[in-house]
Amino acid sequence: MNEQIQSILTEWSYRLPKGYPTEIKDYDVLRDILREMSDLPENDQEHIVQRAMGVEESVKDTLTESSPDYDAAIRQRLGLEPDAEIPQVQGQYNLGRGPLPLNSYDAEIVKKLWPETMNSAIIGKGEIAIYWLYQYQNPSIETFDNRGDDLPDLKIDGENVEIKSYDSHNERISLGRFQKFKETRKLVSIIFGIHTLAKTFNPDDSTKVYSDLAFTGADLTDAFQTFIAVDLLPAKLQLIESFPIFQSLFSQIDLVKQQLRLQEDTYEPTAAAAELLKTILREKLEIKPGDNGYIINTRSKDPADIYTYQIDFQAIDNESVLNNVVINGGVIQVNYKNIFGAEKG
């Protein structure tokens, strides 16, 4: 055990009345000590506390930034004894962008490890295989698991990494649910609501009713055409003065413009629709893996076929986001390769 680990555990024991944790507030003491005595990121500190709940050995293991649970799962999956050495990765693989070609030996190990999830609902296929691929290189690229609801799957060389396992690198991949982002969902509801309301009063217009849980970039562009036309009505001021309902309507329009920072150069349907989709995408990706973080897809039909996308908010252009982000059944689906693939950089 290195000196930092010993010091933290000793200090924790010293500050607890009985020398060991007996109630939930004792773990707040560990949080304080980690903030005082380590330079680990807050997410990593919280991960240590969560794993330390009653299991001191987990604290020791996590502070060394290893993943003993994953190591045990690797040995079991490969049919090794509990204390056997884990096979070393033969190739050298850096965390980058684009395809990750593996040599034949490493590819076979990855295929064997790919199905391993430790029967856990929070560990996806491919996660332990990617952990092995980086942690067991020589020299090792420090990798450890980062299990938690809003934490990325792995830390690789200090970078946040999410692991996916879809059939193709070229298809839309689920990013998670849209419903939880209530403020952004409200903006979508306002835009579609104004579109539907305006079209309802035109009997010659066949109106498509859009849902805030199922739409595309084309749907948003169509709705923004109506939205902008209503906002720019010549009689806008008279309507507001004469009918209170229009005061509320135009207040909602102003809210959308303010939240999306729609200026003169973006206040046209295509650019406005793109800005809203960028907002949805950024809002979700900021949680995990974050800007400049990574998403690794291990193709389920061939787990050794691996592609890495690096998230770069600045690289998201209007055409890409409009054509490659959809909301389907309340789930955000993204073609990462067309937005963040290597050819984009």
Image: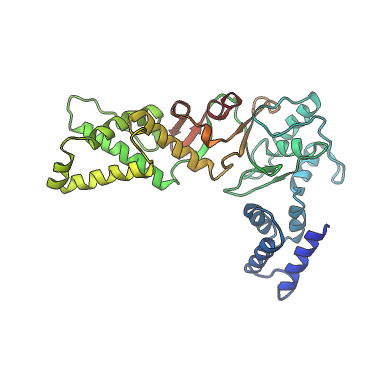
Is 298 drawn above or below residue 193 in the view shown? above
Q: What residue is shown at x 56% (from left), y 30% (from top)?
A: 340
Q: Which image quarter: residue 130?
A: top right
In the image, residue 163 sits, relative to residue 208, either above or below, namely below
Which quadrant of the figure has residue 99? Answer: top right
In the rendered image, residue 271, in percent from the top left (x then y), is placed at 38, 31
Q: Position of residue 283 (x, y in %)?
A: 48, 43
- Label total for image: 0
Which residue is situated farthest in the left direction here? 242
Residue, x 60% and y 47% (percent of image)? 151
Q: Can you name the residue that lies furthest to the front here?
A: 264
Q: Nearer the viewer, residue 330 or 263?
A: 263
On the image, which quarter does residue 47 sit in?
A: bottom right
For the C terminus, the image quarter is: top right
- In the foreground, 128 or 151: 151
Residue at 65% from the left image edge and 45% from the top image edge = 120
Which quarter of the figure is the N terminus placed in? Answer: bottom right
Location of residue 294 in the rendering, given as x and y in whole percent from the top left corner: 62, 37
| Horizontal side of residue 168 vs 113, given as left or right | left
Residue 39 drawn at (x, y percent): 69, 56
Q: Is residue 150 above or below residue 32?
A: above
